[in-house]
Image: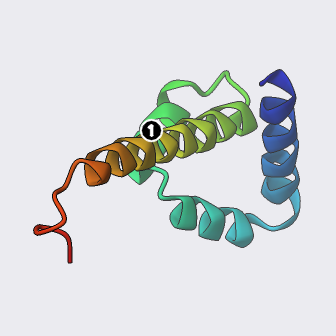
Amino acid sequence: EEEIVKIVKQKVNELLQTDFNALLTLLYRIDVNEEKLKWLLETNRDKDAADIISGLIIERQLQKIKSRKAFKTNSNNISEEDKW
């Protein structure tokens, strides 16, 4: 887990320095909450922006995994008549 955090942070840092538009596109595609990101960056000015952004990316990806698992579990409980 620590290795994943490290890798994501390195990539975010690289994009912050070299291709900010690509970072914004990535955040949009991952569906990171823009308001939460703005608030965290504003209220944590003493923290590394790459730490904050990578934390939100990982948090969002974990939410998606949890949601997909829940949906998969629930879809297995649907009767054959109700499935399309």
On the picture, is 1 further left or further right than 46? right
Toward the front, the furthest residue is 80
Q: In which quarter of the view is residue 21 placed?
A: bottom right
Position of the C terminus, as image quadrant, is bottom left
* Image coordinates for residue 58, horizontal then vertical, percent: 62, 38
Q: In which quarter of the view is residue 47 placed?
A: top right
* Image coordinates for residue 20, horizontal then vertical, percent: 73, 64
Mark 1 crowd level (few <14, some 14–19, many ≥20, 10 Å Cα): few
Q: At label 1, which amino acid type do we have? A: Lys
Q: Helix, strand or loop at disc 1?
A: helix
Position of the N terminus, as image quadrant, is top right
The answer to whether 72 is drawn above or below residue 6 in the figure is below
Residue shown at the point (68%, 39%) measured from the top left:
54
* Image coordinates for residue 10, horizontal then vertical, percent: 88, 42
Q: Is residue 38 visible?
A: no
Residue shown at the point (81%, 58%) measured from the top left:
15
The answer to whether 46 is drawn above or below residue 60 in the figure is above
* Image coordinates for residue 6, horizontal then vertical, percent: 85, 32
Colour pattern: rainbow
On the picture, is 72 further left or further right than 22? left
Report which residue position mark 1 lands on: 66
On the picture, is 64 further left or further right than 4? left
Toward the left, the furthest residue is 81
Residue shown at the point (35%, 43%) measured from the top left:
73
Q: Depth check: give the residue in front, 62 or 23.
A: 62
Residue shown at the point (70%, 62%) measured from the top left:
23
